[in-house]
Amino acid sequence: MALFAALVSCEGGNSIAGKDPIKVGVLHSLTGTMAISEVAVKDATLLAIEEINAAGGVLGRPIEPIVVDGKSDWGVFAAEAERLITAEKVSVVFGCWTSASRKTVKPVFEKHDHLLFYPVQYEGLEQSPNIVYTGAAPNQQIIPAVSWAFENIGTKFFLVGSDYVFPRTANAIIRDVVVARGGEVVGEEYVLLGDSTVQPAVDAIIASKPDVILNTINGDSNVAFYKALRQAGVTPAETPTISFSIAEPELKSLDVAAMVGDYAAWNYFMSMEGAANKAFIKKYQDRFGAGSLTSDPMEAAYFGVHLWAQAVESAKSANPLSVRAAIGDQTYDAPEGLVYIDAETQHTWKAARIGRIREDAQFDIVWETDKPVRPVPFPQTRTREDWAAFLDGLQAGWGGQWANPGRPAEAP
């Protein structure tokens, strides 16, 4: 309750103190391999809640966040989602990073007909009435990055990722696009989520001599991967890497000087111009420290809270069913630019961007779309039936889970 008291006592918040709060869940990994990414997303979520409370709350009531640690373990995510809904009686949950955690909690939200706001780019092949997706669909990140690489780097690709549903599916999409364009996938390797056994992947990269590496490794395995890559003499100058899950906060744990010239594909970069972004950065740094960095998943989490609050006001209710009915009408002037929810899919219209890593752990934007892109959750390279069979095959191969279960004991 100390955190809640602090949230409602900030400037403008005294008028809502004492009123019945609207409880919301904040479910992220605060420990384990994914904490490197998710702690900052949790902080951005709380920042948005603080802003809304300072402005008078929602429906004249304060928002009370119930912050929960998913511990980088999808089983914990599912159990905590159940508890947040049934015991804590939250009106919505903001959370998850990995698709393994999202897919594990999805049946929980569907069983209770509840609502999850998911803030991270992902592999697509999903559309649930109980999830609002504020991160990128494949046609807003993965596919544009491959097309850009074809036109600017080369046609020989090496795919490396963590061994769970997002990288496996992203790489299937990438293969379809590469083959359709007449390119070549010269190698594909996976690392257990949370593992540092990356040398086999690096050896395969050296042997295959790709033009570009497409990296879907998540969590702190990236530290070991980039270290081994540089020790092997693979540099951005000759073989650049495009990453799909490394943003500004993750760069703090990496040797940035050795990564200058590598790329990342996102919808938002901290280096973007614009009044909304400058205000977002200032508020975040005022709250969490002058050296704090912002990132795409943080920004998507931040504006997701604001979109939810707008939908609550429109519906005049925080009930999940009422919010779902109103969410398709919502737009927001986010730090990345104008975003709006696609009523048909509950995914977000947003621009796609590619950035090159700089020495100061920021990105120079080298390419972007000129307007928001309509989200397409199901890439048309295969039929929906084929994609469903692909996912079923992955899950069956992993014993009913959404990640390779042969993981290190301390990892998720």
Image: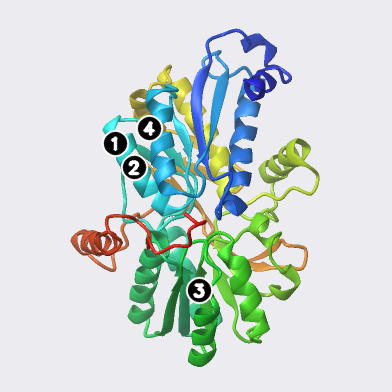
Q: Which residue is mark 1?
A: 110
Residue 389 x, y percent position in the rendering: 21, 62
Left or right, 399 with reference to 212: left
**Residue at 77% in and 68% down:** 359
Identity, as a three-letter code, of the amino acid under mark 4? Glu
Identity, as a three-letter code, of the amino acid under mark 3? Leu
Identity, as a three-letter code, of the amino acid under mark 2? Lys
The CA distance from mark 1 to mark 4 is: 11 Å
Q: Is residue 180 visible?
A: yes
Mark 4 and mark 3 in contact (Cβ < 8 Å)? no
Element under label 2? helix
**Earlier residue among tags 3 and 4:** 4
The CA distance from mark 2 to mark 4 is: 11 Å
Q: From the viewer's side, name the closer residue of 360 and 207.
A: 207
Residue 55 x, y percent position in the rendering: 65, 21
- What's the coloring here? rainbow
**Earlier residue among tags 2 and 4:** 4
Mark 1 and mark 2 in contact (Cβ < 8 Å)? yes
Please name which of the two marks, 1 or 4, marks the residue nearer to the observer: 4
